[in-house]
Image: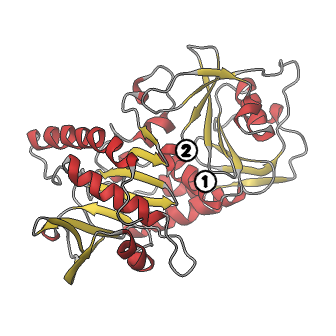
Amino acid sequence: MDTARYGGAKTAASRVAAHFANHIAAAERDGQTVAAAPGISTLETIIDAAFWASLRREEGYTPKISLAYLSPEQAARPMVFERPIALAPATLAKVAPAVERAGIHLGVWERDGELSVWGTTRTIPMYCFVLEVSSPGLLVIKHHRGEESGKYVNVAVLEGDRLMMIDENASSLPDCPPLLTSLLGFDAPASWAQSLHVLVQLAASMRAHKRGGALLVVPSGSEAWRESIVQPVLYAVRPFFSELADLMQDPRAEGQRWQEALARAVDVVAGLTAVDGATIITDRYELLAFGAKIGRRDGSPRIESVMVTEPIEGSVATTMNPVELGGTRHLSAAQFVHDQQNAVALVASQDGRFTVFAWSPCETSVHAHRVEALLL
């Protein structure tokens, strides 16, 4: 297995190399300090090693690692090994337990003509190539937007022999919801406070609990959403829970303590989506209810179809019944958005799929955006 070549590495390397070369060259023209652009052969080697490492098990555990292509000099306060270790599947699987926590990267750089792992780092420069082993055979390629933003942008997903390149132009499509634009992240501002979208954090946290769930985002100050919810609401919250809303108005935003408080508040709300039924918040992030049952509004027709797209290069919009997306949870969320056109519905499946339902004025129909590739 150590000597076998992963075909996906060769397929992805040239396209990923072009992506990083273009973005890094543009940033350098603007006078920004950025990471070095990885070459095609470098990418092939890193991807190949990570793929085979993902299929190993070490003491019963599947490796979860993050590889970053940079030299020790480009990292801030790195932990440097006395002797670099081999960039090999067996070695990566061995060291994985020490670096599986979020935010820790194994630094990869060339030494004596060969790529090796020189140590670990928590800080990396803008547009640094990052490859994460998410699960067996599932790799995610990302880049960093710089130290200030704390934000990564997904570039490509490799799942077995399938390469999914994220479409950078998806956010420019008509009726693209702000959530999708924030998830794509390509045009996000540099400041953490500006680029942060709480719904992105909620989506990621919903997906992480792996129980499936639905989150309905309704206009603040309106009670129209109640027309599409079965009454009485068993787990209504009154007065509404405002921790998320208060944090978003906190003038101390961007501080470490604020970020930690926000993460805790996000997990509290996202955790409620694991309860059967839908969680309801306002567009100001005020929690109104959870475990709510969605019903068709009186006089509203039953939704029969939605337009489905995925922000992946080469994907084609299709029309399908919302049940085909994942069952009754998806059907009820699509019906809710059909009846409440100022609302947005986020739906996580137990298998990791994630769909954002939003009303499309251009198409005069509900649009289902498949975004799981952006949340890995």
Q: Nearer the viewer, residue 201 or 77?
A: 77
- Return the mark for residue 372: 2
Residue 290 appears left or right of 90: right
Task: Residue 91: give x, y in percent of width and height.
Answer: 35, 76
For the residues bearing labels 2 and 1, Cβ distance under 8 angstroms: yes
Residue 149 lies in what quarter of the image?
A: bottom left
Task: Residue 278: give x, y in percent of width and height.
Answer: 76, 46
- Return the mark for residue 343: none
Residue at image coords 47%, 44%: 161
Q: Please name the amino acid that badge 2 sits on.
A: Glu
Residue 108 appears left or right of 279: left
Residue at image coords 58%, 16%: 361
- Examine the rendered structure and indicate whether residue 312 appears above or below residue 36: above
Q: Earlier in the sequence, mark 2 or mark 1?
A: 1
Residue 168 seen in the current view: yes
- Examine the rendered structure and indicate whether residue 218 appears above or below residue 145: above
Q: Which residue is mark 1?
A: 207
Q: In the structure shown, which secondary structural element does the residue marked by tag 1 occupy?
A: helix
Task: Residue 148: give x, y in percent of width and height.
Answer: 28, 57
- Examine the rendered structure and indicate whether residue 119 appears above or below residue 371: below
Question: Alpha-carbon neighbours of circle 2 within 10 Å: few (<14), some, or many (≥20)?
Answer: some
Q: In the structure shown, which secondary structural element does the residue marked by tag 2 occupy?
A: helix
Residue 76 appears left or right of 200: left
Residue 154 appears left or right of 122: right
Residue 224 seen in the current view: no
Q: Nearer the viewer, residue 311 or 234?
A: 311
Q: Nearer the viewer, residue 162 or 178?
A: 162
Residue at image coords 20%, 51%: 38
